[in-house]
Image (cartoon, rainbow, N blue to C red):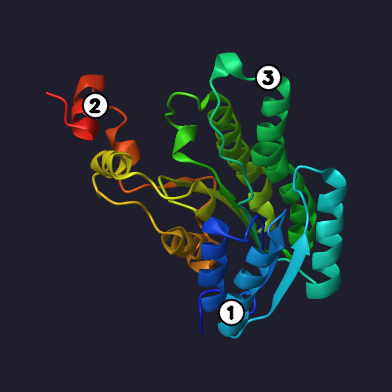
Amino acid sequence: MGLLENKVALITGSSQGIGAGIAAVMAREGADIVVNYRTSADGAEDTAQKVRDAGRRAQIVQADVSVETDVDRLFEFVVERMKRIDILVNNAGLTSRMNFLNSDTSFFDRMIGTDLKGVYLCAHRAAPLMVKQKWGRIINIASVHDQGTSHDMAIYAAAKGGVKSLTQGMAIELGEHGITVNAISPGWVPVPNEGPYEKPLYDAFCNRLPIPRPGKTEEIGEVAAFLASDRAAWLTGQVIYVDGGQTATLNMPSRVRDKAIYGLE
């Protein structure tokens, strides 16, 4: 038997990238999957087919997690089709760079709306269902930028920092109901919509990591499956950095860090 035998998992933003990788691993571990997407219907069908190939049920539902009425419809769908929800993975998010001086409130609202408000809305709908079951797992996908960020990422980092704090606060309030709440903060995991990297940039990214390569979506999925399982029953309120060691370098003096990344003398 797998770690998640006969559990029902809703994974937001699972038509591609990290969400699709989490869906594939959780299906392999025995979970039935609700695949959520905002715009990529074809990608959602690809993810669902991989779930079915693993011998598990898959349902697909379109919803924008930043829109409250969409989230209401999403959970109505889950309850109607699956009858329960055991695992919520708040993966849907935007990763957009913009210089703070050039930003505006529409950019801010879009980033916070999906990356933070969407986590709140989905967790707020899932938690009462899990309370009734006296069992649940909420896993929020944050980012290494919740600990240390870079140029043009101030608003993204603010959203992900909010996810980290929300995770810890929910864990405190939901633990007595048999619900654990944890976050995964991935490092550099290339996803399809980023396109190919030029070799100098690719090499620079790799050189900054103690494990000098990008992560794989399935590696995030393995951690998510563990957090969703009974093996992690006494683990809550934690942020797990799955980043090839990137955050371990954040306390380096800047010149040392730049030498490690760029080979500066």
Answer whether labels 3 and 1 touch (C-beta < 8 Å).
no
Position of residue 263 relative to residue 210, above or below, is above
Pointer 1 residue = 5
Disc 1 element = loop
Q: Find residue 229 and report its horizontal and vertical position in percent.
A: 53, 67
Please state if 210 lies on the left or on the right of 137 as rendered: left
Q: Is residue 174 above or below residue 19?
A: above
Residue at 66 percent across and 37 percent down: it is: 116
- Mark pair 1, 2: CA separation: 46 Å
Question: CB under 8 Å between callouts 2 and 3?
Answer: no
Q: Amino acid at mark 3?
A: Asp
Residue 86 in sight from this viewpoint: no
- Which of discs 3 and 1 lies nearer the camera? The answer is 3
Question: Which of these two is toward me, 20 or 89?
Answer: 20
Q: Secondary structure at mark 2?
A: helix
Question: If you read the primary sequence from the N terminus, does the residue marked by circle 3 or circle 1 appear first?
Answer: 1
Q: Which residue is mark 3?
A: 104
Identify which residue is drawn at 74% across, 50% down: 122
Q: Position of residue 263 (x, y in %)?
A: 17, 31
In the depicted structure, whether residue 161 falls above or below residue 54: above
Q: Which residue in the protein does label 2 denote?
A: 258
Residue at x 65%, y 55% (from the top left corner)? 13
Q: Quadrant of the C terminus?
A: top left
Mark 1 or mark 2: which comes first in sequence?
1
| Amino acid at pointer 2 | Asp
Question: What kind of element bears circle 3?
Answer: loop
- Tag 1: residue type? Glu
